[in-house]
Image (tube, helix red, strand yellow):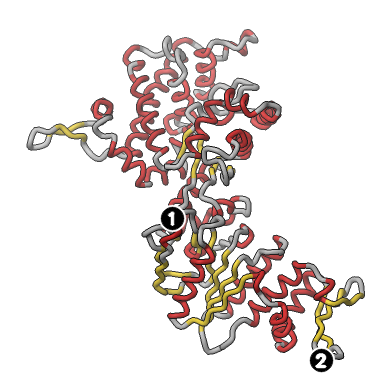
């Protein structure tokens, strides 16, 4: 890492706050949406590196003069040899310079496969000219070997195929290793340049935002390092979209991504939908990792998660550690005092004031909710044993069965599992689903246990609201399949998801936007919250 104290102010873009950073990687990325001040920021950073003794070379692809590049290639055999090696490996081409009658040198490209030659200026495409320029700068841009060098590449992806972008990024990494006195900054809109191999690579990412100061990670804790070490190998190009917009919404899987993307299109560029994308991350724990990355980078990432994420997994852990729910809950203390008196022990202070024993935290509230759900669940299991319930009404008669019968058949299924049900997140989720389903538990629970139902509902709603303060939106009905209308799905887990999804998706694609918003109102309401500015 390079330690250079940097401070940049751009009041007309960010207001009074300034961007500050002291630790820099040898390869740094400046990312963010258009109009967020990336190029201006890079220029200010480069100027401060220059004051610290660095020679600065600032290059924008559209501003590199072709004559200077060709002159460098002609006059510097070492640079030309490196570039010819790249051309030969990737394009089966090489380059030479012929002296014309007027004394100037003409760059000639040799296509080895076709056995033809042609003038580079007249016959070559933008892409090859672009890569020639970039490599000329990369290999020969140091004016003085006695000075440390700061390279700034502004939008190097212009005219480059994604594979060539990745190759160029790899060459930057290689040069950075061999020239430890150099530092590189890339201003980019391309996810192919987000080449994060080690957790510390995140320290070299600066994220620019619309209307507020850029953010970055100054250091990682030991836990963060361990988390990202496992995560980065699964962090693909598709996921990296979130570096270029504060408006990304993360969901667990591809079915959620497709359903919410279809509903997002009904907003028509209004209510914060412009520039928003829905990214599936491939699992519940991955949601927690993206939540953590967004928190550290200062981006406004939004999460839409299944109900079972409350009871186990990385998302629950990082959400409970986030300061925003704690701040929100603190503001609710007086309003929720009656509820807290029912669920938490109290103590009397020396001056006679009655206070809750210990701080009210999101983790503590979720733990209390889990205890209540276990009480209700065990009572339901006892009811099943007493009644001798062994199969669902649907299985016995071919009829759907009442809501209570469907619920009991689901719990009866869980009763055969070897796991301790109190530790099974799906079991607790099904109990909570039943708590929010009117009438399901009325004839099942004894009066004393049934008295817990309103308390559980209030606790769950409090948890949902606290999570929303950190931009995490829980699907209260369970998972995305529980919101389907083509096929009615009750409770979790859900089987045959792929078939159900394709039927639902095909049905949705045939609907008009107005119908989609009306029929899927519970989902569009959640999506609307996720799109809103806090």
Q: How many labels does the image show?
A: 2
Residue that sits furthest to the right in the current view: 115
Q: Is residue 215 visible?
A: no
At numbered mark 2, what does the secondary structure look like: helix, strand or loop?
loop
How far apart in space, not on screen, are marks 1 and 2 (Cα)?
54 Å
> Which of the 4 image quadrants contains residue 189?
bottom right
Residue that sits furthest to the front in the current view: 12
* Numbered badge on residue 238: none
In the image, residue 188 lies at what x, y percent? Answer: 59, 62
> Which of the 4 image quadrants contains residue 376?
top left
* Numbered badge on residue 212: 1
At numbered mark 1, what does the secondary structure look like: helix, strand or loop?
loop
Q: Is residue 357 visible?
A: yes
Q: Is the C terminus in the top left, top right, bottom left or bottom right quadrant? A: top left
In the image, residue 22 lies at what x, y percent? Answer: 40, 69
- The answer to whether 292 appears left or right of 509 in the picture is left
Name the foreground residue: 67 vs 7: 67
Residue that sits furthest to the top in the current view: 397
Q: Mark 2 points at which residue?
A: 103
- The answer to whether 31 appears left or right of 140 in the picture is left
Q: Which of marks 1 and 2 is nearer the N terminus?
A: 2
Q: In this view, does 312 lie above or below 520?
A: below
- Residue at left offset 53%, top offset 24%: 491
In the image, residue 317 lies at what x, y percent? Answer: 41, 44
- Residue at left offset 47%, top offset 52%: 299
Name the foreground residue: 508 vs 282: 508
In the image, residue 261 lies at what x, y percent? Answer: 61, 38
């Amino acid at each position: 890492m390079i330690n250079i104290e940097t401070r940049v102010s751009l009041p007309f873009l960010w207001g009074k706050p300034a961007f500050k950073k002291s630790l820099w990687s040898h390869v740094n990325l400046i990312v963010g949406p258009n109009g967020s001040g990336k190029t201006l920021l890079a220029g200010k950073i480069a100027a401060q590196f220059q004051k610290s003794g660095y020679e600065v070379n600032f290059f924008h692809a559209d501003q590199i003069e072709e004559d200077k590049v060709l002159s460098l290639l002609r006059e510097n055999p070492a640079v030309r040899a490196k570039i010819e090696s790249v051309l030969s490996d990737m394009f089966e081409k090489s380059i030479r310079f012929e002296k014309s009658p007027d004394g100037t040198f003409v760059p000639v490209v040799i296509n080895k496969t076709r056995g033809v030659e042609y003038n580079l200026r007249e016959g070559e495409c933008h892409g090859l000219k672009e890569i020639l320029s970039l490599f000329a700068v990369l290999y020969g841009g140091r004016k003085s070997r006695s000075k440390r060098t700061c390279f700034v590449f502004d939008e190097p992806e212009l005219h480059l195929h994604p594979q060539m972008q990745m190759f160029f990024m790899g060459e930057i990494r290689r040069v950075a290793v061999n020239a430890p006195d150099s530092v590189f900054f890339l201003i980019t809109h391309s996810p192919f340049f987000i080449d994060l191999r080690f957790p510390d690579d995140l320290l070299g990412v600066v994220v620019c935002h619309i209307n507020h100061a850029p953010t970055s990670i100054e250091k990682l804790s030991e836990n963060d390092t361990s988390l990202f070490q496992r995560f980065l190998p699964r962090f693909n190009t598709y996921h990296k979209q979130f570096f270029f917009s504060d408006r990304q919404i993360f969901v667990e899987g591809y079915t959620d991504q497709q359903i919410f993307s279809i509903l997002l299109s009904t907003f028509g560029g209004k209510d914060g939908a412009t520039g928003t994308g829905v990214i599936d991350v491939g699992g519940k724990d991955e949601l927690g990792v993206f939540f953590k990355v967004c928190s550290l980078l200062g981006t406004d990432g939004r999460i839409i998660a299944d109900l079972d994420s409350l009871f186990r997994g990385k998302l629950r852990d990082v959400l409970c550690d986030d300061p925003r729910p704690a701040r929100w809950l603190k503001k609710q203390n007086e309003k929720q005092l009656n509820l807290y008196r029912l669920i938490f022990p109290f103590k009397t202070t020396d001056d006679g004031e009655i206070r809750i024993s210990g701080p009210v935290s999101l983790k503590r509230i979720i733990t209390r909710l889990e205890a209540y759900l276990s009480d209700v669940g065990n009572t339901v299991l006892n009811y099943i044993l007493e009644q001798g319930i062994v199969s669902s009404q649907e299985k016995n008669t071919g009829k759907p069965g009442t809501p209570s019968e469907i619920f009991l058949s689901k719990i009866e299924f869980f009763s055969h599992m070897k796991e301790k049900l109190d530790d099974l997140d799906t079991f607790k989720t099904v109990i909570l689903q039943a708590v929010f389903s009117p009438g399901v538990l009325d004839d099942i629970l004894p009066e004393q246990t049934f008295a817990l139902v309103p308390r559980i509902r209030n606790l769950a709603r409090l948890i949902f609201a606290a999570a929303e303060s950190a931009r995490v939106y829980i699907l209260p009905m369970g998972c995305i399949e529980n919101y389907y209308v083509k096929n009615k799905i009750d409770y979790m887990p859900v089987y045959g998801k792929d078939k159900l999804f394709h039927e639902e998706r095909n049905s949705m694609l045939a609907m008009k936007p107005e119908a989609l918003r009306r029929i899927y109102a519970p989902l569009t309401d959640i999506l609307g919250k996720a799109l809103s500015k806090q």
